[in-house]
Amino acid sequence: MNGMEQAPTQSAVMELRGERVVVGEAYDFLDEKRLLLAAELLHQLEDYDRLQREFELLRQQAVAALVQAIARHGLQGLEVYPADAIGAGHFDSTTSNFMGVTLASAGLRLPEGDSGASPVNPSPAVRACQAAFRELLLRAAELAGVSGNLYRLLTEYRLTERRARALENVILPEIEQSLKVMTTHLEELEFEDTVRVRRQAGI
C-alpha cells in the first residue's frame, strides 16, 4: 500500500486510522486463536502419546499370544480356526467444534461372543490370541481418531499463523507507512499555508 495512492486528506487519514484499528483487532483475534490451537494441539498430542504407548504394549502382547497359538496349533491349524466375529463391527464417533476445527472422539464397537462356528480343537491359546488382537483393534480406532484431530488442528494452526504473520508483518506496516506519508504531507501543506498567510499579512 502506498500512502500517496489516494489524496492525502484529513478524511483519508481518519479512514486509514479506522482501518488500522480493524486490522489490529483482527490480528489480536488471530493471535489468540493460534495460542488456543497450540494448547489444544499439545493436549491432543498428550493423548496420542499415551494411546501410542498403550497400543505398542498391546501389540507386543498380541504378537506373543500369536506365537503361543502357532506353537500350539501350527500355522495351518491356526488358519482354519474359526475367526472372531468382528465383521459386524462399526465405528462410533462423536464430534465437537473447537475454533472452527472438527474434533472427533472415535471408537470401534465390536460384537460380543464368537462367530458361532465351533472349533474342532478348542484352545485357550487361540482365544487369548483373539482377545489380544481384539484389544489392539479397539485401541487402534481411538488412536486413529486422535491422529485425525492432530492433522486438522495442525492444518488450521498453520493457516492461522500465516494470516497472523501477514497482518503483523505486511498489512499493519503498510498502513503505518501510509499514515506516516499522509500525515507528513498534510503537515507540510499546513506549514506552507501558514507561511503564505504570514507573507500576505506582511508578518
Image (cartoon, helix red, strand yellow):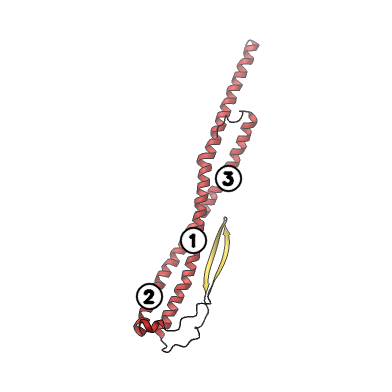
Marks 1, 2: nearer the viewer: 2
Secondary structure of residue under mark 1: helix
Q: Is residue 141 above or below residue 125?
A: above
Q: CA distance from mark 1 to mark 2?
A: 28 Å
Using a 10 Å C-alpha cutoff, classify the residue at mark 3 as few (fewer than 14 neighbours), some (14 to 19) or many (20 or more). Answer: some
Which kind of residue does numbered mark 1 sit on? Gln
Residue 26 disc label: 3
- Taking the view exactly as shown, the residue that stands out farthest to the left is 71
Residue at which label 1 appears: 44
Secondary structure of residue under mark 3: helix
Q: N-terminal of the two: label 2 or label 3?
A: 3
Residue 70 disc label: none
Residue 63 disc label: 2
- Taking the view exactly as shown, the residue that stands out farthest to the top is 202
Q: Residue 119 versus residue 1: which sits nearer the camera? A: 119
Q: N-terminal of the two: label 1 or label 2?
A: 1
Which kind of residue does numbered mark 3 sit on? Ala
